[in-house]
Amino acid sequence: MVKSNPVPYLIISMRGLFVTGTDTGVGKTAVAAGLAWLLRKKGIDIAVMKPFATGDKLFSKMFKSEDTSILAEAAGVSETDEDLNPVFFKVPASPLMAAQILGRSPPDVRGALFPLKKLGIKHQFVVVEGIGGLMVPLTEREFVADFVRLADLPVVIVTHPRLGTLNHTLLTVRVCHEFGLNVIGIIVNMMPRRPTAVEKRTPSAIQRLSGIPVIAVLQEKKKRPNYEEIGKMLEKTTLVEKILV
């Protein structure tokens, strides 16, 4: 696993964004890759990272995780998989549970900051994608939210308009507040082309009840959208303006 790092190195500030979701399957990877593609298009020296990943198999010879592969392609980076995804377990579960099933040590949360800070020094901006939601356990006492707090990155929350989203989204916002995370906005992903009355009202309800701006509502596609399509949708929003201030 990743080793611990000297404290002075970890306190170096960097520009970046952490993309989290209200749950798995809400489109975090598509949004993170789309943003990376858009920033690259605008001439920003971009880096990407998936600090923690799990899966039932290795994706390819170059990348253990498919998510990392998508992010790397969108950003056009040259770093190795070890730099972009320092922690991977070959069990589709939370990193803590996957480590326990495999009989391995849980992730070194602070150690995973080392490659992130290294990317932050090398590049102008880093887009970091989480795993599941903020309360996914990394160790018995540490969660994804702990890593985000240590990384000191602003957060964008990706959610959806389906039933249950108000509960999941408001809980995610509350976790951000409790951990002292700076949420710059919420993205409602996979809005149906013909939304129901409930789905139509979901973005405004999320914004009103959470107090966090909904900065994008991304329409659902018949086919799985690629990162370029997502990037073009994001280009019409205020997301880039907010993160590059």
Image: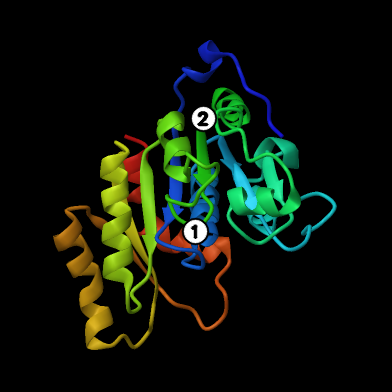
Asked whether the viewer can see residue 225, the reply is yes
**Horizontal arrangement in the rendering, residue 25 relative to residue 73 (left or right):** left
User: Residue 8 location, x and y as percent?
Assistant: 52, 11
Going 50% across and 57% down the picture, which residue do you hit?
132
Q: Residue at x 36, y 39 (%)?
A: 154
Whole-percent x and y of residue 149? 40, 34
Q: Which residue is mark 2?
A: 124
Q: Tell me the element at label 1.
A: helix
Find residue 60 and report its image quarter. Answer: bottom right
Instruction: Please state, as top left, top right, bottom left or bottom right, where the C terminus lies in the image.
Output: top left
Which mark identifies residue 99?
none
Q: What residue does disc 1 label?
A: 28
Q: Position of residue 70 (x, y in %)?
A: 65, 56
Dot 2 amino acid type: Gln
**Foreground residue among 161 and 171:** 171
Compared with residue 232, is residue 46 higher up or lower down, i.e. above or below?
A: above
| Outermost residue toward the top in this view | 8
Side of 43 where 3 appears, left or right? right
Q: Residues within 10 Å of mark 1 (few under 14, many from 20)?
A: many
Looking at this view, is 183 or 30 the one in front? 183
Q: Could you tell me which residue is drawn at 44 percent across and 37 percent down?
A: 146
Of residues 189 and 135, the one drawn nearer to the viewer in this rendering: 135
Is residue 79 among what the camera can see?
Answer: no
Q: Is residue 134 above or below residue 91?
A: above
Amino acid type at mark 1: Lys
Helix, strand or loop at disc 2?
loop
Residue at the outermost left position: 208
